[in-house]
Amino acid sequence: MSKEINYTPGHSVHFIQARKALEALGQWRRVTIINIEEGVITLQIGDRGENYICSDTTRLREVLDTGRVPLNQQGEHFAIIAPHNVLIIPCADEGKVFPAAAGINSTVSYLDEGAALWSPTTDGAWHLFSVALNTQP
């Protein structure tokens, strides 16, 4: 018996959300991950910090802890907020460097019980996380 996957924002990325987010390059915004707590992350977008619900914070920490996520000019992990409530984390393959011009294959997302987790690119992958702006005080 398979478990029910929750595709509401902040839980799991549906493969159609993954495809649309990866296709929307012109709408990607660079962000910085300021803090990760259980089920909530804080992103710096421009000059403000915002809290987002993210039920997959354990996997997010694991990806960041690999040491293979590129750093921005301030030495912080590079991250992207894309349309359709998708946070994208580029991560190089072991022993590689994430390419400056990594290709995007929006039709390929690796799934776990239906949820899109990542899409491959040259020497790495685009890791996908569902996020939702946390409107709770």
Image: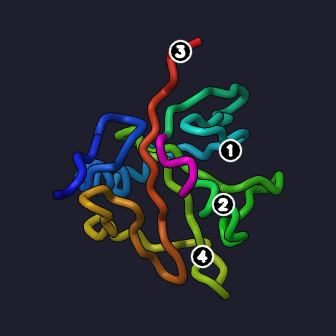
The residue type indicated by label 2 comes to Leu
Label annotation for residue 136: 3
Q: Earlier in the sequence, mark 2 or mark 3?
A: 2
Please tell me whether mark 3 sits on a helix, a strand or a loop. loop
Crowd tier of the residue under label 1, counting other residues whose Cα lies within 10 Å: few below 14, some 14–19, many 20 or above: many
**Residue with the mark numbered 1:** 32
Please tell me whether mark 4 sits on a helix, a strand or a loop. strand
| Mark 1–mark 2 distance (CA, rounded to whole Å) | 12 Å
Q: Earlier in the sequence, mark 1 or mark 2?
A: 1
The reply to whether dot 3 and dot 4 touch (C-beta < 8 Å) is no
The quarter of the picture where the N terminus appears is bottom left
The residue type indicated by label 1 comes to Thr
**Residue with the mark numbered 2:** 64
Q: Earlier in the sequence, mark 4 or mark 2?
A: 2
The reply to whether dot 2 and dot 3 touch (C-beta < 8 Å) is no
Residue drawn at x 24%, y 51% as measured from the top left: 3
**Residue with the mark numbered 4:** 92
Residue drawn at x 56%, y 47% as measured from the top left: 57
Q: Earlier in the sequence, mark 3 or mark 1?
A: 1
Label annotation for residue 111: none
The quarter of the picture where the C terminus appears is top right
The picture places residue 59, in percent across and down from the top left corner, at 54, 57
Residue 54 falls inside the magenta stretch: no
Report the magenta residues as a range. 55-59
Q: Earlier in the sequence, mark 1 or mark 4?
A: 1
In the visual, does 94 lie left or right of 1?
right
